[in-house]
Image: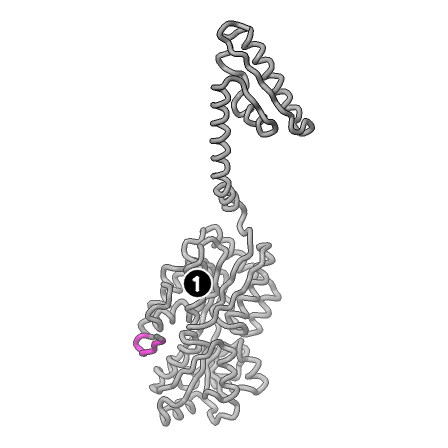
């Protein structure tokens, strides 16, 4: 051994010789050669032929007692720093791996602002079933009824914009509520990313079959004789059921008393049990009761007759000139949802609506399905309706809070 050269001792305690493998044994041979050359040629051994990375990999399998005191301190500091860095980065690396993975990687939540059995619920569950098949993940429908749908929409607006929470939206929740509530908890113009415009549905003016009214004009005459006494139910303040009654009173110069219920089914039952005088409910939710005689239809709120109720006139035809309420609906996500996720949802939702069984079911229930509509066009429709309806509702004096 040359003078001034410290003897390098290396002791490697084999923890599991069967697992070390050929690569580790090769590194050990190179290490032995390094010791031999260092003893014979100290000046030429200034640079070790084994990389720190290679030695670190050896350390993952073995316990190493290394070389000189200075070498031991250097390697010990390196291993501690590397280990600390890996531990600190593991959560971030896990998050990045998930973020970069294909969406979706977990179930989706579909918030519905009305009760089970309502129009919103029927559409959401029908489309949600097909959407789940297409995405390979469950779509969990959550009914968040109450406060005219503001509870569900406010929760949707606050949800993470990651594509895992979407919501059913309607003219009532996105437009009417902005005028009816001083603080609805969300701003329809900026808090949502439109996904897909589905279509529309008319409402039907209904009364109990024992009621003497046979036409909308009969109800107008009764309301004028008893101002503020005739009642109408709805599935909640701010719904199209509510605003249909408000517009009826405004158009005919009558005063009706609004009685909101938790959901459309409860509001319809109130008419059937004569708790209230009348109601204005979506065609799909009352057509069965009308056809079997449990309810009487006086008119539909659209400008064209419903193909499911061809013998029932429109309110405009029946003498309430200019009256029209044709509720639209669709799906939206929280603002800031990645465009590629919105595009995927848009495509899959329209594919779901094209499934023959789905289309037949919704059309049979009275839904008027829209053709494929760009998300941007849906957004413009929302903006146009806000400009049209908010001033109208405010002028009527209708308020909820």
Q: Residue furthest right?
A: 18
Q: In the figure, 199 relative to 216: above or below? A: above
* Mark 1 closeness class: few <14, some 14–19, many ≥20 residues within 10 Å: some
Instruction: Determine the secondary structure under disc 1.
Output: helix
Q: Quadrant of the C terminus?
A: bottom left
**Left or right of 251 in this view: 261:** right
Q: Position of residue 311 (x, y in %)?
A: 52, 84
Q: Is residue 332 magenta?
A: no
Give the image quarter of residue 17.
top right
Q: Position of residue 133 (x, y in %)?
A: 60, 58
Residue 276 appears in the picture as rendered: yes
Q: Quadrant of the N terminus?
A: top right
Residue 200 appears in the picture as rendered: no
Name the residue rendered at 50%, 33% in the picture: 83
Q: Which is more toward the observer, 277 or 275? A: 275
Q: In the figure, 60 relative to 387: above or below? A: above
Q: Which is more toward the observer, 54 or 233? A: 54
**Left or right of 272 in this view: 239:** left
Name the residue rendered at 54%, 16% in the picture: 49
Give the image quarter of residue 160.
bottom left
Q: In the figure, 204 relative to 274: above or below? A: above
Name the residue rendered at 54%, 20% in the picture: 66
Q: Position of residue 237 (x, y in %)?
A: 41, 76
Q: Position of residue 292 (x, y in %)?
A: 59, 85
The residue at which mark 1 appears reads as 155
**Left or right of 288 in this view: 159:** left
The range drawn in magenta is: 394-400
**Left or right of 167 in this view: 399:** left
């Amino acid at each position: 051994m040359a003078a001034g050269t410290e003897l390098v001792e290396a002791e490697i305690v084999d923890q599991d010789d069967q697992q070390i493998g050929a690569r580790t044994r090769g590194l050990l041979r190179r290490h032995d050669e390094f010791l031999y050359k260092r003893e014979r040629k100290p000046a030429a051994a200034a640079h070790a032929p084994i990389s720190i990375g290679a030695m670190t990999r050896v350390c993952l399998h073995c316990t190493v007692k290394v070389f000189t005191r200075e070498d031991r301190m250097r390697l010990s500091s390196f291993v501690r720093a590397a280990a600390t860095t890996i531990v600190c980065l593991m959560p971030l690396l896990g998050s990045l791996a998930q973020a970069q993975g294909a969406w979706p990687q977990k179930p989706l939540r579909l918030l519905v602002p009305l009760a089970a059995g309502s129009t919103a619920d029927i559409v959401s569950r029908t489309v949600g079933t097909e959407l789940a098949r297409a995405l390979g993940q469950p779509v969990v429908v959550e009914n968040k009824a109450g406060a005219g749908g503001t509870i569900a929409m406010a929760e949707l607006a606050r949800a993470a914009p990651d594509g895992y929470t979407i919501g059913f939206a309607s003219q009532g929740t996105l437009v009417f509520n902005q005028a009816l509530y001083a603080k609805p908890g969300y701003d329809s113009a900026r808090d949502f990313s439109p996904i897909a415009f589905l279509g529309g549905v008319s409402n039907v003016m209904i009364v109990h079959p024992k009621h003497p009214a046979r036409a909308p004009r009969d109800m107008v005459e009764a309301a004028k004789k008893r101002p503020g006494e005739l009642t109408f139910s709805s599935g909640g303040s701010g719904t199209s059921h509510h605003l249909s009654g408000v517009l009826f009173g405004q158009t005919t110069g009558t005063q009706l008393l609004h009685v909101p219920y938790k959901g459309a089914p409860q509001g319809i039952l109130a008419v059937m049990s004569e708790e209230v005088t009348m109601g204005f409910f979506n065609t799909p939710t009352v057509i069965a009761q009308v056809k079997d005689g449990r309810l009487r239809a006086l008119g539909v709120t659209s400008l064209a007759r419903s193909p499911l109720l061809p013998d029932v006139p429109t309110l405009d035809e029946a003498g309430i000139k200019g009256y029209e309420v044709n509720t639209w609906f669709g799906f939206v996500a929280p603002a800031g949802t990645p465009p590629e996720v919105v595009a995927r949802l848009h495509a899959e939702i329209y594919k779901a609506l094209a499934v023959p069984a789905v289309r037949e079911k919704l059309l049979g229930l009275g839904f008027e399905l829209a053709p494929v509509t760009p998300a941007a066009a849906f957004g413009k429709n929302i903006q146009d309706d806000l400009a049209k309806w908010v001033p109208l509702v405010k002028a009527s004096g209708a308020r909820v809070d």
